Every structure is written in structure tokens, then in C-alpha cells.
Amino acid sequence: MRLEIPRELVKALNEAEKVAVLTGAGVSAESGVPTFRGKEGLWRRYSPQELATPEAFARDPQLVWEWYNWRRGLIAPLEPNPAHRFIARLEKEVPWFLLITQNIDGLHQKAGSVRMVELHGNIWKVRCTKEGTVKEDRRVPLPEIPPRCENCGALLRPHVVWFGEPLPVDALEGAMEAAENCDLFLVVGTSGVVYPAAALPQVARSHGALVVEIDPEETPLTSLATWSLQGKAGEVTRELARELGWEL
Ligand code: OAD
């Protein structure tokens, strides 16, 4: 069944000058990255309290690193899907653009996105718990678990945001500013329950932006969307690209 793309939406995408995009785990689902919630979600099988909090890491860094090592191994061979490519293309088409992602998988960069902020960090970076230095580390699997800082020997941690931790200030400020100033805000594949990211579409809407949502399920953000396209991100963006005459 082909999804109906509203004419006004195509027009709005063609005419938009300032675009912000918020993505969640759903944008990477068709690439093979598991989402967090829902039937097959990671939080069904694993406890965030035991794996994704600073307390969990202090208690058992080995366990936390084994989980991240497993996720790194899962993500490493995966490729961006049409939704990542659509977003990278959108960046090239509009004069002003910011991608705000909650994902840590690096697939947006692999698809060519440049103007972006990562609200929850990046799984391919490690941070020294003593010195605070951040380094890229793409080794899969990690040769030593938990890994240690080459410089000072202290534990390294994944450079991601855990529950109970603040978001990186620069990324959040950039995201807020984008939500306040854009004329079109596109939301792709987020359940809209984790704040402050979930507040961004509301900020955009209250500042007069058109809000477009792409998600197979209804979410708390659906009711504020100008257009809600119910479907998988890769399939919907392929249709959108066709309407816009873009090759993905
Ligand atoms: P969730 O797992 O909460 O939500 C995924 C969303 O993607 C849901 O709305 C699904 O309906 C939708 N979805 C599933 N398949 C899709 C597809 N093929 N195309 C489009 N959408 C699809 O993931 P997030 O909203 O990203 O935080 O979760 C937010 C944060 O909660 C994550 O960044 C993570 C998690 O705990 C931290 O770890 C700090």
C-alpha cells in the first residue's frame, strides 16, 4: 500500500528555509539497531538501572562495559537506511539546518550528516573517568574490559549520557535554539517520552513551526504534529524523496 503524502507537506518541505530534525531509535530500526521501548525493545530485556546509570557503572563497570561492547558489536556492521540518507539530503537542500539526534550509533554521520548535535553522546567514543578526556575508539570487540586510560590508567567509560546525568550543555542549547527558530521541525522515530528531547517539538510548535512526525505508532507528539505520517521511517522517507524528486 502506498502512503499518501499530503501536497501541502511537499510544498512546505520545498519552501522551508530553516529546518530542524529530531531523531530517535526508530530512525535506525530498519538498519537493524534495536529500539528501547516496544515489543522488541532493549528495555524489555535489560534494566536501565543496572546498565545505564552512573550508579550501575560505579557498582559493576565490567557488566556495563560488556553490555556496551555487545551493542558496539551489533552496530558496527550496520549501514544507514533511506531515512538517514533523506535527512542528510535535506541538510543540503535547505539554507539553515540542524539535526538533533538522541541516537548514539553514528549512523547519521555514516549517511553524510554534518550539521548535527548528539544529545545522548556516541557509542564510538570513550571518556576517561579521571581526566575527562574524550577519544574515539572503534575497536570491536574491545581487547580489555573494562578498558583503561592509556595515559593515567583510570577506568574509561562510554561517552554516552546515562539516566540521571545532564545532557551536554552545548548540544542542548543548540537544539533549543533550533527548535525556537526553525520554520519546519521534523520528528522521526522517537517515542517522545524522554525529556528534555521530547520537549523540543513542543517548543518548535509554540514558536510557530510546522511539525512533521514519522513513526509507525501514535506517540505523545502525534497530537501536536501538523502532519503525522504513520509508517516506517525508511519507507516514508523514500516516498517523500520520490515526491520531492530526490535520489536517495
Ligand atoms: P524508543 O525505543 O523509546 O522509541 C522508538 C520509537 O521509534 C517508537 O515511537 C517506535 O514506534 C518508533 N519506531 C519503531 N520502528 C520504527 C521505524 N522503522 N521507523 C520509524 N519509527 C519507528 O526510542 P527513543 O525515543 O529514541 O536514552 O528513546 C529515547 C531515549 O530513551 C534513548 O535515547 C535512550 C532511551 O532510554 C538513553 O539511553 C539516555
Image (cartoon, rainbow, N blue to C red):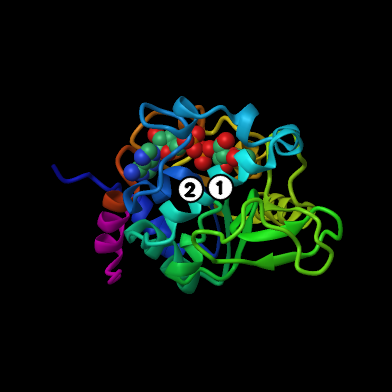
Q: Nearer the viewer, residue 63 or 84?
A: 63
Q: Residue reaching furthest front?
A: 144
Please state which amino acid type lies under the numbered disc 2. Trp
The Cα atoms of the two marked residues, 2 and 1, are separated by 5 Å
Vertical arrangement, residue 207 with respect to residue 97, above or below: above
Whether residue 138 is visible: yes
| Up/down of 12 relative to 197, above or below | below
Q: Is mark 2 within 8 Å of ligand 1?
A: no
Residue 98 percent coordinates (x, y): 59, 61
Residue 34: x and y in percent read 41, 42
Q: Name the foreground residue: 39 vs 114.
A: 39
In the displayed structure, does residue 216 sit left or right of residue 127?
Answer: left
Answer left or right for 19 relative to 14. right
Query: Circle 1 sits in a helix, a strand or a loop, which is it?
Result: helix
Q: Residues within 10 Å of mark 1 (few under 14, many from 20)?
A: many
Does residue 89 show up magenta in the picture? no
Q: In the rendered image, is residue 215 in sight?
A: no
Q: Residue at x 54, y 42 (%)?
A: 67
- Residue sitting at the far left: 1
In which quadrant is the C terminus drawn?
bottom left
User: On residue 70, which mark appears?
Assistant: 2
Residue 43: x and y in percent read 50, 29
Name the quadrant containing residue 136: bottom right
Q: Which residues are magenta?
A: 237-248
- State the residue in front, 7 or 125: 125
Q: Magenta stretch containing residue 240, yes or no?
A: yes
Residue count near mark 2 (Cα–Cα under 10 Å), binned few <14, some 14–19, many ≥20: few
Residue at horizontal 27 percent and vertical 48 percent from the top: 5
**As shown in the figure, which amino acid type bears the numbered disc 1?**
Tyr
Can you tell which mark lies on residue 40? Answer: none
- The quarter of the picture where residue 35 lies is top left
Q: Which residue is mark 1?
A: 68
